[in-house]
Amino acid sequence: MTDSPREKLLRKLGALDQMPSLPVVVTQLLNYFQKPVDHQNLSEVAHLISQDESLAVRCLQLANSPLYGRYQAVETIHGAIVALGLRRMHEVAASVCLLKMTPPAASAFDPVFFWEHSMECALMSRRLAHAISFPHSDKAYLAGLLHDIGVIAHLWLVPEEFGQAFQLATRDHIPLHEAELSVLGVTHAETGKHLAERWRLGPEVTTVIAYHHEVLRVSENKVLTAIVTIADLLCRMNKMGYGFSEDRQVDLSEEPAFACLMNHCAMSNTVDWARLTFEMEGYLQEVRRLVSMFYRVPQ
């Protein structure tokens, strides 16, 4: 008897024999940045990044972008860390490394749109975290960046079936996770949870990956999950998703994630949400330019 797409995917996830592991440098960096900032050493971080020439070059490109607050050029990894700080350099390194994770052939699904959305969501998540005085804006950025990594697993493990799901979402203008559930029997959120556990991304980020479409199911890390859920929704509703539009009207005040922030974060009630989303437009344009540059320029 032929396996269903869900059974096929879950079997492959169990072995993950076709999925690449995180590059060694990325794993080392992510583990290193788990340390308290006062236990991190600038020279050690610079050394780790410099071990991968491609990573170092791209980190400098991103570090010199106005997107990260730089208007004067930095020419060395050491200089970039001094200019940006260790926390921001963590964001830069993670962003650059994860751009490499898409498979060589992604059929009709354009990886540029995927990484644009991921970085847009990361930036929006960080901005929301600042706005509501969430104390871990770096975690919000990383969780926003990684929230859709299950899509990468689908591209590696079940590319044909995922292509069908993507075509369904594009044709019917429905959310990608709904199309995945219809075609694959599983969403990128569930797949992403497996991948996050394999990569040992930590319980907070793993929770966000698993429940960013089902925030009401979250028992811990509610605020972080709600931040990324709202950021993801705002990006998708502003045509900053996966290259297609969704036919959906959104009233932010009626979203479960918004209610979660109102209930669990007192500062959320003081935010001018309309102004906040308007201010993000300039940042998001810069994200598009940078990610397109990473993909379109011959390596």
Image: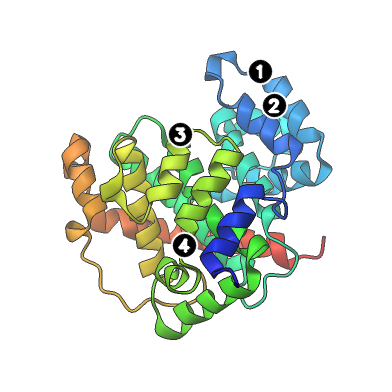
**Tags 4 and 1 touching, CB below 8 Å:** no
Residue that numbered label 3 is attached to: 203
Residue that numbered label 1 is attached to: 41
Residue 19 appears left or right of 193: right
**Tags 2 and 1 touching, CB below 8 Å:** yes
Q: Quadrant of the C terminus?
A: bottom right
- Alpha carbon of mark 3 to alpha carbon of mark 2: how far? 24 Å
User: How is colour applied across the structure in the image?
Assistant: rainbow
Q: Quadrant of the N terminus?
A: bottom right
Q: Secondary structure at mark 4?
A: loop
In the image, residue 239 above or below residue 219: below
Q: Quadrant of residue 38?
A: top right
Q: Tag 1 or tag 4, which sits nearer the N-term? A: 1
Q: Amino acid at mark 4?
A: Val
Looking at the image, is mark 4 or mark 3 nearer the viewer? 4
Residue 108 appears left or right of 261: right
Residue 288 screen position, x and y as percent? 56, 63
- Alpha carbon of mark 4 to alpha carbon of mark 3: how far? 21 Å
- Alpha carbon of mark 2 to alpha carbon of mark 1: how far? 7 Å
Residue 133 screen position, x and y as percent? 30, 34
Tag of residue 186 = 4
Tag of residue 45 = 2
Q: Quadrant of residue 269?
A: top left
Q: Tag 1 or tag 3, which sits nearer the N-term? A: 1
Please tell me which residue is depicted at 18% across the width and 44% down the height of the picture: 262
